[in-house]
Amino acid sequence: MTTTEAAPGSTGAGSISGAEIRLEDVTKRYPGQEAAAVDGLSLVIPAGEIVMFVGPSGCGKTTSLKMINRLIEPTSGAIHIGDNDVRQQSADELRRTIGYVIQGGSLFPHMTVAKNIAIVPKLLGWDDDRIRSRVDELLELVSLDPGKYRDRYPRELSGGQQQRVGVARGLAADPPVILMDEPFGAVDPITRVRLQDELLSIQRELRKTIVCVTHDIDEAIKLGDRILILQEGAQVGQYDTPEAVLASPANDFVADFVGAGSSLKQLSLSRISEIELRRPTTARIGERTDEVKRRAESNGDRAVVVLDEHDRPTAWPWLRQLKGETIHAGEQDLVNLDSRATLNDALDTMLTNSHGGAVVTGDRDAYLGVVDFTSVTDFMRAQQEAVERDHQAEVPAESNPEDEHVEEVTSDDGSTR
């Protein structure tokens, strides 16, 4: 058995509210099966980080995840959350202290959004006022207007909205640990990017310990502070930062799993936050349209970013599209990018946007600026050139025969050669 130690990781802006998780020689054997589903897995998951479990089908990643909250009971070994051995608690008590988010949100269809989120706080005996306040707080956190969504039923929500409610429910009792099993696997690509960005924004603020199963190495690279690549039997192929996994695969299995184009994947590690954003003209909902147009024209802008009372962007109309006496929120849902989104996400978003750019947001979806195609491609070109320069510097120059020292030999006649 090999214990995989945690390497130093990145830190976020918020204070850590998560707890360390330790798996010690954890094994799961099913009756009638010769090979163990998970065989002697040892792992340290640092408090306040996102760790992505990734690997081929049948490698034991979901089994390993579910043993943490005892949805699957380990055959042997120990699992600690903080100082507590999970097997020393009742399973029900344990699960009330661990958030759990699965594909599609798994909401109860006969319950409103508010009641779905309130399930665990009710079980914990919270009073109604506290629950109501917590529900509204969490809906704001996942960028759903409480007044608009609190009393809706799951059937009235899009897939992405249902998944956001599922995340809110997982956070309801403020657990130190959140487990996520393929949470964004059932939504379209654009919604998937937005939900990933939402998770990064939430994590930047809350700093929970999040363990997430995915089959998608690109998602693991984007979201993970660390990536755990599992081989069959939940054997650790590599456990390290995304940068280290891409730059130095531990073995042939990891190299094959990461796949070709790892240098391009390394470029995708770059975040929008590393690029200087443009600050085009903004307008507030309710402002006079003629005043906004004059301001934009004097700034040389042909479009404006519309912000609500919480500084959240709601629309990005061209000046010719501004109608009526006052600015309104816009009829279409604006696709924003979190500042921690990758440059690949930025380019994908721009391909569907007539502005040749994307609106960038930070905590609680607050507006930061606009990233455009030119700034992204210039940054990626500079990064690639830096990588090539570093590579050339590491390769020793080939020796030139003309530069080699030739020892002079004196012949009998006094000449040299």
Image: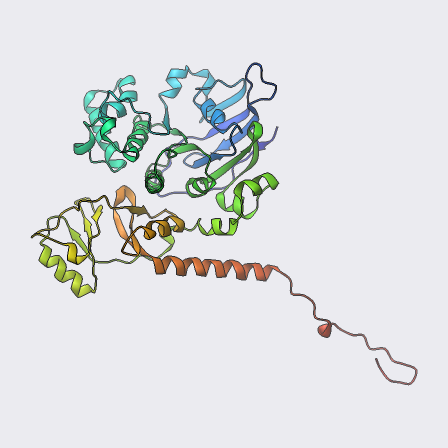
Residue 63 position (above or below residue 209):
above
Which image quadrant for residue 143?
A: top left
Q: Quadrant of the N terminus?
A: top right
Seen as rendered, the residue at the extreme left is 325
Which image quadrant for residue 208?
A: top left
| Front-lying residue, 161 or 221 | 161
Residue at 59% across / 39% down in the picture? Answer: 253
Is residue 84 at all visible to an observer of this figure? no
Looking at the picture, the colour scheme in use is rainbow
Image location of residue 39, percent across then percent down: 58, 24
| Front-lying residue, 165 or 244 | 165
Image location of residue 390, percent across then percent down: 54, 59
Is residue 80 at all visible to an observer of this figure? yes
Residue 29 position (above or below residue 144):
above
Seen as rendered, the residue at the extreme right is 412
Residue at 15% across / 61% down in the picture? Answer: 295
Q: Is residue 219 left or right of residue 56?
A: left
Image location of residue 415, percent across then percent down: 86, 84
Q: How many marks?
A: 0
Q: Quadrant of the C terminus?
A: bottom right
Residue at 38% across / 29% down in the picture? Answer: 178
Q: Is residue 372 left or right of residue 49?
A: left
Which image quadrant for residue 137?
A: top left
Image location of residue 305, percent across then percent down: 21, 53
Q: Is residue 312 left or right of residue 18?
A: left
